[in-house]
Image (spheres, grey):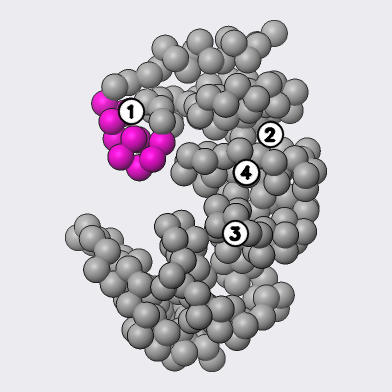
Amino acid sequence: MTTAQDVIDELSALEDPKARAVNERHGDDHGVNLTKLRGVAKRIGMNRELAGELWATDVTPARLVALLISRPKEYTVAQLDTMLRESRTPKTTDWLVNYIAKKSPLEPKLREAWFTDADTHVRAAGWALTTDRVIKKPAGPDLEGLLDQIEAEMVAAPGTLQWNMNETLANIGIYHPHLRERALDIGERLEVLKDYPTPPNCTSPFAPSWINEIVRRREGDK
């Protein structure tokens, strides 16, 4: 039977100084190639008990494996809330939100609780869930209210919270044509991420550029 220590030993053997240097530039504290990490998780298979033990180690690669060997429905609201508050590396937070919280049957409760939390790290996760709702279930959120809040708060929002609010703004503009003009106007006036360095052939995260580019592509596919 695979133990948490077995997994940690295997992940330690996969540490690559070059990968660590790249990851650390993005705020992550490990050097394990994610393709190889996924291979470890695939070999283990779904195992909620082992996932809990791996998460408790507070070792980032082990926590990433824990998320990959878990089913979203296996977690309670309280457990996911605790895990989010414990998760401070970008990749761990990203995987927790995208692989577990978004797919959980408890997602509506998580989104409602996190969206108004006093902790900006937690609130950023609430905005990430809101963006997903804007795209997939647009009848739910108050889109006009979201634009009001973005207009009032996004410029002063820190780090990931600002990024996620900007993502919500862009996707409202992309997926809701009746609000596109207002979303573009907010983006142009606030200028959030306007000067963000964007590699060639990549879409700028500046909301007006992002909206216009994706709409152009979507209309070109029709």
- Quarter assignment of residue 29: top left
**Element on which disc 3 rests:** helix
- Quarter assignment of residue 117: bottom right
Cα–Cα gap, marks 1 and 2 = 25 Å
Crowdedness near tag 3: few (<14), some (14–19) or many (≥20) residues, C-alpha within 10 Å:
many
Where residue 51 appears, as percent x and y from the top left, is 67, 26
The residue carrying mark 4 is: 85
Q: Using the image, tell me which numbered label, if any, was put on residue 189.
A: none
Q: Residue at x 24, y 61 (%)?
A: 198
Q: Are marks 3 and 2 in contact (CB under 8 Å)?
A: no
* Relative to 139, 134 lies left or right: left
Front-most of residues 134 and 87: 87
Front of the two marks 2 and 4: 4
Cα–Cα gap, marks 4 and 1 = 24 Å
Q: Amino acid at mark 1?
A: Arg
The residue carrying mark 2 is: 70
The residue carrying mark 1 is: 20
Q: Between disc 3 and disc 4, whose residue precedes? A: 4
Q: Residue at x 47, y 17 (%)?
A: 11
Q: Amino acid at mark 4?
A: Arg
Cα–Cα gap, marks 2 and 4 = 18 Å
In this view, the residue farthest toward the left is 200
